[in-house]
Amino acid sequence: MIENVKHRCILYMLYAGGLRISELINLKITDIQSERSLILVRNGKGGKDRTTLLSKKMLTLLREYYRMYRPEYWLFESPNRKNYSASSIRKVMKRALKRTKITKQASPHTLRHSFAAHLLERGTDLRYIQNLMGHGSSKTTERYTHITKKGVDDIVSPLDNLDI
């Protein structure tokens, strides 16, 4: 378990929303749309905007984080109130892997791939995963597996299925 609430929040967000590091560090407080259970990703890869899932468990953890850290502009801020750095996130991930004694190679981007793979395993339609991931081409998403038939209203973040 990651004891630091901010660090836990950062890693869970990467997984729960299928975010890239660059997307996570550029999230503003206003990009969390709790009433719609969505995260607004602005200017993602290729300059595209998209929405992705905001897990109920993630929202609870975000509220705890917000009460503790009181970010002013960026969702995840460094001590000098700038947005958090990619290198800091990589260090957080490395420490988390070491503490859990996971020896398999993994990076923060691995959490994004796990998000897609776990949605597919639960039967989420590949087209919805493509939109959630911000992939311009279905070929990029197809590397995760086969196409299924399930509506976006039935999609739940994989984090909500973990007992954490």
Image (cartoon, rainbow, N blue to C red):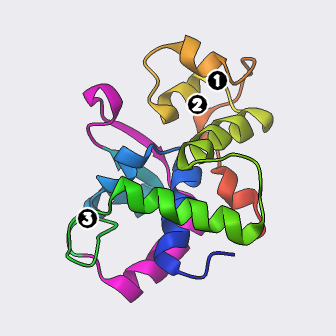
> Would residue 93 be found to the left or right of residue 10 on screen?
right
Residues in magenta? 42-71
Going from N to C along the chain, the mark reached first, 3 or 1, is 3
Q: Are marks 3 and 2 in contact (CB under 8 Å)?
A: no
Q: Which residue is mark 1?
A: 126
Q: Residue at x 21, y 75 (%)?
A: 72
Residue 59 seen in render: no
Circles 1 and 2: CB atoms closer than 8 Å: yes
Secondary structure of residue under mark 2: helix
What residue is at 72 percent from the left and 17 percent from the top?
147
32 above or below 53?
below
Quarter holding residue 125: top right
Q: Secondary structure at mark 1?
A: helix
Drawn side of residue 32 relative to residue 157, left or right: left
Observer able to see residue 134:
yes
Q: Residues within 10 Å of mark 2 (few under 14, many from 20)?
A: many
Mark 3 or mark 2: which is in front? 3
**Callout 2 amino acid:** Ile
Name the residue type under label 3: Trp
Tell whether position 159 is magenta. no
The residue under label 3 is 74
Q: Which mark is residue 129?
A: 2
Of pointers 3 and 2, the one earlier in the residue sequence? 3
Q: Quadrant of the C terminus?
A: bottom right
Q: Quadrant of residue 28?
A: bottom left
Quarter of the image for the N terminus: give it. bottom right
- What amino acid type is highlighted by mark number 1? Leu
Image location (x, y in percent) of residue 128: 57, 29
How crowded pointer 3 is (Cα within 10 Å; few <14, some 14-19, many 20+) is rated as: some
State the CA–CA distance, disc 1 to disc 2: 5 Å
- Which marked residue is nearer to the observer: mark 3 or mark 1? 3
